Amino acid sequence: MLDRRHLLTGGAAALGAALSACSSDGPLTFSPDVGEPRRNFAGRTIATPDYHAVYADYPGEPYAIRSFDYGQIDQRWLRQTVEYRGAEPTGTIIVDPASKHLYFTEEPGRATRYGVGVGREGFGWSGRAQINMKRDWPDWVPPHEMVERQPEIRAQLEKTPRGLGVRGGPKSPLGARAMYLFSDGGGHDLGYRIHGTTEPETIGTNVSSGCIRMVNQDIVHLYTRASVGTKVIVLT
């Protein structure tokens, strides 16, 4: 499992892995207002896309989204359409940290399932949220607490419109897209994001500071479907 000590030796690549992209700097747990979906809400695989096509170079971007060897990821974490047995309405995101899966309900009985990287020990969280903001190639700004605890990262930060951080682009830990999670109802930024990564090998692992990471091709795919106001359920 990656940790922040990698900053001392790994340069920009370690910055993305070790800092894990979140702006929150600690665990959060809050209770959903209704019961969680049952764990057996996911059924059989209905369809799989042409992985050679969907994980190829992605055109039309200001920065390159490169193809990667999807064979390095366990097939259970590659994008696929699955039977969905839960009662959540169409357009809901459900994250199951135990299985390292994110579901987006496309229609009754059907969802797109993606593999994700989730929070490492001490940084997991659960509850209900909603997407209140979306950004292409966003800047990443670490919280003050993180910088105080790891002052060596200052050398890798620069001025951005939101403060010292990493400008949006190929070096940003947030990848090609980020969707910002607020409390259910939208009043409070939880500090957690669903975002991209250029490190596909971290999918299916507990690696982040609580954020939910996806390969860039998958976050772009989800980003076009999940609008502002989309409800998000993160299971315990």
Image: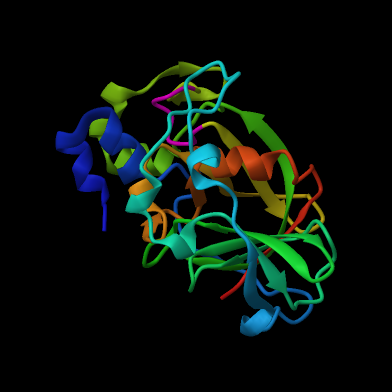
| Residue visible at 40% across and 43% down in the picture | 145
The quadrant of the rendering that contains the N terminus is bottom left
- Figure disc tally: 0
* Quarter holding residue 128: bottom right
| Residue visible at 70% across and 50% down in the picture | 182
* Quarter holding residue 173: top left
- Between 214 and 231, the residue placed more toward the observer is 214
* Quarter holding residue 106: bottom right
Q: Is residue 126 above or below residue 161?
A: below
Q: Is residue 17 above or below residue 94?
A: above
- Between 145 and 14, the residue placed more toward the observer is 14
Q: Position of residue 48 (x, y in %)?
A: 59, 57
Q: Position of residue 21 (x, y in %)?
A: 45, 42
The quadrant of the rendering that contains the C terminus is bottom right
For the record, the magenta segment spans: 169-175
Q: Position of residue 174 (x, y in %)?
A: 49, 36
Q: What colouring does the structure picture have?
A: rainbow
Q: Is residue 188 above or below residue 85?
A: above
Q: Is residue 170 magenta?
A: yes
Magenta span: chief secondary structure: loop
Q: Is residue 183 left or right of residue 40?
A: right
Q: Position of residue 170 (x, y in %)?
A: 42, 24
- Between 77 and 171, the residue placed more toward the observer is 77
